[in-house]
Image (tube, rainbow, N blue to C red):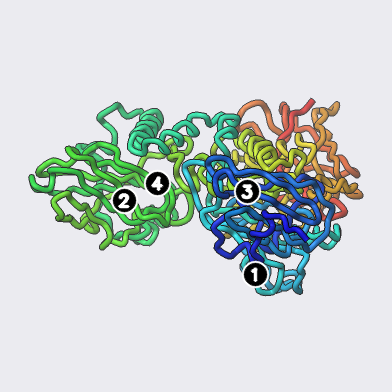
Amino acid sequence: MRINPLLAVLMIGSASTAWAAPRLDGVVSDHAVIQRGQPIELAGDAAAGETVMITLAGAAVTTRADRNGRFAAQLPALPAGGPYDLTVAAPSGGAVVRDVLIGDVYLCSGQSNMELVVSDAQDLIPDAHPPADDQLRLLTVTKQSAAAPLVQFATQPRWAASSPATVPGFSAACFYMVQSLRRTEKVPVGAIHSSWGGSRISAWLSDAALHRADMGAEADLLALYARDPAAATRRAMTIWEGWWRAGSGDAAGREPWQPAAALDWQPVPAMTNFETWGIPALADYNGMIWYRREIEVTPAQARGAATIALGAVDDADRTWVNGQGVGGSSLASQPRVYALPEGLLKPGRNVVTVNVDDVYAFGGMTGPAEAMRITFADGTSLPLGTDWRYAVAARLPGSAPRVPWDDINGAGTLYNAMIAPLGRTHVAGIAWYQGESDTGIPGYDKRLAALAADWRQRLGSPQAGFGVVQLAGYGEPRAAPTESGWADVRDAQRRVTAADPHAGLAVTLDIGDALDIHPGEKHAVGERLALAMRAAVYAKPVAPAGPAIASAQRSADGGVTLAFTGVVGALHARGAAQAIGFELCGVGAGTCRYAAGRVDGTRITIAGDGKPATRVRYAWADAPAINLTDDAKLPVGTFEIAVH
């Protein structure tokens, strides 16, 4: 029998073996799950110009690597099945990707509530300790950021079958979702988890999506950083300084970072979180603090460039030396090290000023003190770990600008390193659990819609289901109606998913934790995401978001009648005769007042109170008090709707 010369070079082994060539991109590796019913698009590296043959489940395709050694190929769609071996062969080498299943693939992403693992959620429930299931495969993408899109992962992630050894360290919300879908759909399921705690949604947007979400300036600044980091840093400092002057009214040359700034400077007790200093006003303070350190520099030290190391800063910093910006970051765990150009330092007195922006929990310059120093071109260094002074900063409206190359608060950085390398990894659905880091930042609806459209297009799955977890309640309940950044994000999540025919919403208002931004009840989150996917992906006759607001009609007495869709059975006011959490509102801010609702099947009637009501809000608080559910015990989520 004559042997095909391409297959003759095929060496039987594992894709994890170090072959010279070829190599596949993405997550097609041993134990992978490939999406059923969609073309199988593969890409990778090989020797320039050589022919590459790929075979899977009786289908074969031949392609040729270009002059840069890149190749792409497409195999026909396959039904659920396997396991199969996928072979890749070329004159330069070959490989076998073993134990491949064809089924449904789900991508799970977001911030820390998606990242929270099974072992840190409800570990006493039976589903937290499931038996091994070889038809359920799990993969976690390693945390990485990049200034430009990567073709391949910096650290190649690996698939593993679901088992008592692999489940505890996997995303709880993602696992409980795919576990539920695996039970009902009876096909192989693969879950790709790619998330990073504390991240803003902007970090997960591609360049095109950033422009679509009115963040083109941030995308362009990131592109400048990839070409010229120093120029981008100068531009970012200019943007931040402009933001400060606009909010504070300070004239140029009179800002707090100037060496002559006359603030109420007090000694810093220790290079630790300022909440631990024993100062009552700072015990639970979230906001900005200025730090200042004066140093004496010799003429020899002032000659040439230098480097300043400030240790870690929680959460974000902007740093100036002698009034000139030298850098800033917002990753709390990252030590700050900035370059000082030649000519910046002067013989004699010099002033280092640091603005620290604490947005959550603890904050401050945390050192360690022994790591804080300036290193000069002449080889000497000057310790900076003591003799700092501080002043509490003025509170400005809005959020301070972040540099777009920040790992988690940037623009495109996480997409570039943790999503772009997936290439055309077709998926059945995308689960998104994020928003806490975007509270207080306008335009979340545009960013969320841009992400959904962009990821579907780039993954080659335009009709993929898109399940969004609406933020849970967090914080102290309010005694009166108020504005809420958390409610703004929740309503944006509701509106985006309601307008998307392939999307669903997992409402979690009833399972939050007033004291913990990471509520442990992730099993219900996963089950509700699975419900959304059953509607969006499998066209099951279930509501993709539970009870959802449909309309608000003015009644003759000045009250309002609300109609809901997606109700299983009827609505119920749990534990009370009336539904709470509703607000009747006028046109402007400060016009809302609480109102009780009377439940009637799938409708709620709110009596008029003699004041104009042009809109109705529900659950409009960081931690709202609510009691409205349906027969499936699914809660009504946050909404705002105009009255007609």
**How many other residues sit within 10 Å of disc 4, few (<14), some (14-19) or many (≥20)?**
many
* Disc 3: which residue: 422
Residue 345 % position (x, y) = 17, 42
The span from disc 3 to disc 2 (Cα, nearest Å) is 32 Å
Rendered residue at 63%/62% (across/down)? 15
**How many other residues sit within 10 Å of disc 2, few (<14), some (14-19) or many (≥20)?**
some
Q: Are marks 1 and 3 in contact (CB under 8 Å)?
A: no
Q: Tell whether 437 sits left or right of 190.
A: left
**How many other residues sit within 10 Å of disc 3, few (<14), some (14-19) or many (≥20)?**
many
Of the image marks 1 and 3, the number of the one nearer the N terminus? 1
In terms of secondary structure, where does tag 2 sit?
strand
* Disc 4: which residue: 329
Amino acid type, callout 3: Leu
In terms of secondary structure, where does tag 1 sit?
loop
Amino acid type, callout 2: Val
Residue 594 % position (x, y) = 70, 40
Of the image marks 3 and 2, the number of the one nearer the N terminus? 2
Of the image marks 4 and 3, the number of the one nearer the N terminus? 4
The span from disc 1 to disc 3 (Cα, nearest Å) is 24 Å
Q: Tell whether 418 sits left or right of 393.
A: right
Residue 255 % position (x, y) = 29, 34
Amino acid type, callout 4: Ser
Rendered residue at 63%/41% (across/down)? 489
Of the image marks 1 and 2, the number of the one nearer the N terminus? 1
The span from disc 4 to disc 2 (Cα, nearest Å) is 10 Å
Amino acid type, callout 1: Pro
In terms of secondary structure, where does tag 3 sit?
helix
* Disc 2: which residue: 337
* Disc 1: which residue: 168
Question: Mark 3 or mark 2, which is nearer to you?
Answer: 3
Q: Tell whether 258 sits left or right of 73.
A: left
